[in-house]
Amino acid sequence: MLRKALLVLLLLSGAVFGAGSEKPLSNGLAKTPPMGWSSWNNFAENISEQLIIETIDAMVANGMQAAGYQYVNLDDGWQRYKGERRDHPLEADPVKFPHGIKYLSDYAHSKGLKLGIYSGPGQSTCAGYTGSEGHEKQDAALFASWGVDHLKYDSCCSHKDAPDDVVKTVFATMSKALMAQPRGIVLHACHCGWSNIWEWAPAMGINHWRIGQDISDDFDYPGNREGYYFDVLDMLDRGVGLEKYAGPGHWNDYDMLVVGLNGKSVDLVGAGASNVEYRTHFSLWAMEDSPLLASADLRRLDAYTLETFTNPEVIALNQDPLGKPAKRVRSRDGLEVFAKELADGSWAVALLNRGSPTADMTFSVHKDLNLPWIKYTVRDLWKHKDLGEFEIPYTAEVISHEARIFRVTEVKDKP
Ligand code: GLA
């Protein structure tokens, strides 16, 4: 009896404390990294109803939806007013979006896709449009009433130098406001990799958080372009050591994919990358369990780029239910080995050559993966080819800036 009473007391006190900030929040969404498209990198503020409708249609028609892409996300520039929220309401630009945002989410849903939107915790956003400060509950309800499925909440400009406690508070406020809505809305916290956000975002119900400043359309630019932007390899390096913070429902976000921009984006800086480099970028974002948010013009993808975006075997690594991002297990002279454990007991291995000369690269299931396997098979995930059974370390030729991606599986002797 006494034990029962104690248990009830304990449960009750848990419920009371649980109502405070201590209890981890979870919206139960994004069990695997979100896949989709975001408007910013290629279009910046030049977005419109027509562009979004055509992007939705392209995602369905070009096979990306079938490959797993779901979200079509409006970034900054959908709002009607530039300036501070205290001076203007938050409304959709009636010229760019004559039928409003609900019309677009209805259209996305009718095609089996989802719609995302953008705001921020400041008076204004990075591009100078009205933000959500002081109106978080109202805006969360507005987005839900529009049928929105994903919110990118961007504090990169408004809270760049804010103390960590303030940053935490603004994200907690929006996270709770979204969770109070009748529909699930995935929350992306865009704080440009500051405030060690990975340490506290998962418990706040944040589904993905940027690990760095904005990506530029470069594979390996010396330093940071304009003293700010991260190229593909900078972002990859930024993620080393952060793998442990990610898992089902909460992911390190390496920023939008620049695959297919080819240095031609009107707004995003960068000289573009080669097909091989873009493929390497895609493969490593997949290995790291980053959200896969394309940003190129989906209406005009060439065959090679589309093949990069839709490789089912590489996407399967990203969407693996175990949700364990790859770790960099070896790095020497620009030759790096990444390894990712998968739900079925197999592993994915990436051999990345950051240098110029072609290299013969080797991985060992014993030394690099720490596995006691005697015999294993190797499958090349870009060539879609089984390469055979091996008992010794596996060696492959890797050209400059290429990442060869393999799936390795133990061969168990039949009893
Ligand atoms: C910041 C973000 C970008 C984009 C712009 C929009 O720079 O990091 O991803 O959302 O704001 O203004």
Image: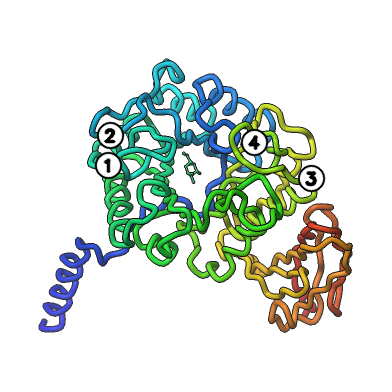
Question: Mark 3 or mark 2, which is nearer to you?
Answer: 2
Q: Looking at the image, is mark 1 or mark 2 earlier in the sequence?
A: 2
Callout 2 amino acid: Arg
Q: Which mark is residue 85?
A: 2
Q: Determine the CA span between mark 4 and mark 1.
A: 31 Å
Residue under the point 52% across and 56% down = 212
- The residue at which mark 4 appears reads as 296
Q: Looking at the image, is mark 2 or mark 4 earlier in the sequence?
A: 2
Q: Looking at the image, is mark 3 or mark 1 earlier in the sequence?
A: 1
- The residue at which mark 1 appears reads as 133
Callout 1 amino acid: Glu
Q: Looking at the image, is mark 3 or mark 2 earlier in the sequence?
A: 2
Q: Quick one: quadrant of the N terminus?
A: bottom left
Secondary structure category for the residue under label 3:
helix
Secondary structure category for the residue under label 4:
loop
Q: Residues within 10 Å of mark 3 (few under 14, many from 20)?
A: some
Q: Residues within 10 Å of mark 2 (few under 14, many from 20)?
A: many
Instruction: Give the quadrant of residue 150.
Output: top left
